[in-house]
Image (cartoon, rainbow, N blue to C red):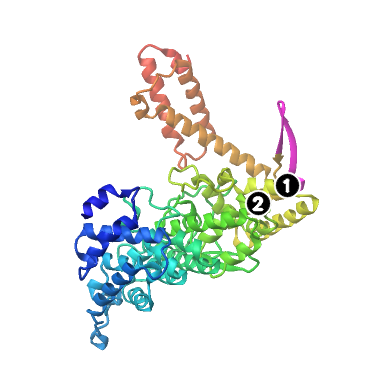
Amino acid sequence: MIRVVQQRHKVNGLIDHLITKPVVQILLDEKNPWDVSEDSFELLADWLQALSLADAPVGNELRIRLRDRLLAHWNSFPRRNIGADVPSGRILQRRRRRRELDRRLTRENFVETLALLGPDIDDAVEACLRAIADDAPAFLAPAADSLWSARALAQKDPELLATLMVAYYIDDEPSWHRAEGVRGHQGRWKGFGAPFFQYYFGGFWQLFQTAPLPTSVRVLNSILNSGAQARVATLSRLSPPHALTDPSDEEDEGSDGETEKGEGEDRGAILSIDGTARLYVGDSHVWSWYRGTSVGPYSAMSALQAMERLIDTLLSRGASPRRIVAILLNGCENLAVPGMLFGLLVRHMENVDTELDLFLAEPIVWDLEFSRATNEHSGLRAKTEGLANLERRRWTPREVAMRLMLQGGQERAQALKKVADSLVENGDRLGVGQELTKNWAASLDVDRYRIQQHGNEMHIEVEPPPELRATLEKHAVSQEAMQTSLRLQNRYWGSVKHDVEHVPLPSEQIAADLAAGRALLEADGDTSATRHVDAVAHVVRAAVERAAAGDMEALGI
């Protein structure tokens, strides 16, 4: 009978709760209907989910019968009290929360059925869920990390859902092999494989749509604070104590400062993005969590994407950006929320007053944003279709500053010039070289803007300060050498010849590249950083092979 219902009356993963009702009535004659078989539990869960989707009100007769069965099962396993008999120790400390509840009270099917009672959750069932949260929070995934369970809990009380989510997602039990500070999504409710994060994964979207915004932000920041603290703690054990230094970055100081760091603290950055200087814990990865292009807990990324979607809707409906910033930074001790906030303000900058100014006055924000914008070209970035102005994801602070300059009047231009001064001052305080900060600040200075004609087109360009021109010219030469080296390497690398679409290069092209390689080596005083010699060696090999075959033109002869 269960199989017939599943096969004939389940469409797109949903069943009709009215058609299923007679089968559920028979199933409820069992002592533990959730534990009869896996098929019977699936039917029971599908029926409860259908009731939740239909917004069935409190007082459903069959749900109440099921609740009585659940409570009877709970009461049949009184709490164990081991108290002072438990010796202290690190291993036992990790298991401190599994001291009282019987394991049969934390099984997935039982916990999920409790949560799916929805509006018919009474004080006794709520006490059961809170007891699991206090005693065995790692087993709350069926209630807190399931979309349908979260919906049912929110129909009862969003505050209850918030409590269970904080208990589940914050992982404060130390682990020797994995310590992200945030528990992950469970495969049963999200599927296996990619994508690993989505705004609708877990209970975040359900909570954020039903709870007051301050409650949602409290849950978000509690989870992200734990994740950021755990990441910095891990980095401090594996690398030098600079949270904002990406271990994978090479020490290459570009004019845009994509790699040079200006951290305020070893554990994060001190920013005054709301007018008050505060430490935000994390690194460049934490800053980009909301985009999914960095290393971090997937559930934290899902939470940020859900909040970004919610705030995007509020801003589109005319919510005050200043008020949004204040609410999101309340209780925020992580770099993930400021990163998301900057992106939100940029995408809605037409409705922004001066909220972006405080961000643009911070050198570390420029540095982190250059890195994030580069990673936007990664295929791992989050899919966020439907949000406003998504093309601005690839903007760097330079484009942001230019757009602010162009859309404001004279008074706004003068205000941005003060932001430029603050940017340089903050850089001096943090030890960031002025060759970087003054270069960035030029984009905020109306006096540095020039209109240049290129052919039939007029371009608006930013002219760097005179004292930086020599440095920038040197950097431009270095960048050109780097690009030439990479071009030669990619063109002559051994594996290229095995590509099915490979076409042998003409001799005149090899000769031209040989001359370019010779000029590269003659101009380069230090080849250790970019390995120009290796790239040129491939060109030489190709020219010699071609000459040995009788084609001397490849040698430029």
Tell me the quarter of the picture where residue 539 sits. top left
Work out which quarter of the rendered image holds the N terminus and state it. Answer: bottom left
Give the vertical position of 1 relative to 85 (above or below).
Answer: above
Task: Identify the residue under disc 1.
Answer: 407
Q: Is residue 459 magenta?
A: yes
What secondary structure is marked by label 2?
Answer: helix
Residue visible at 45% across and 42% down? 528
Up-down: is 383 above or below 534? Answer: below
Amino acid beneath label 2: Met
Chain part drawn in magenta:
446-460
Query: Residues at badges 1 and 2 in contact (C-beta under 8 Å)?
Result: yes
Report the Cα–Cα distance between label 1 and label 2: 10 Å
- Name the main secondary structure of what is drawn in magenta: strand
Residue 259 location (% of width, % of height): 52, 50
According to the image, label 2 marks what residue?
349
Q: Is residue 245 visible?
A: no
Q: Secondary structure at mark 1?
A: helix
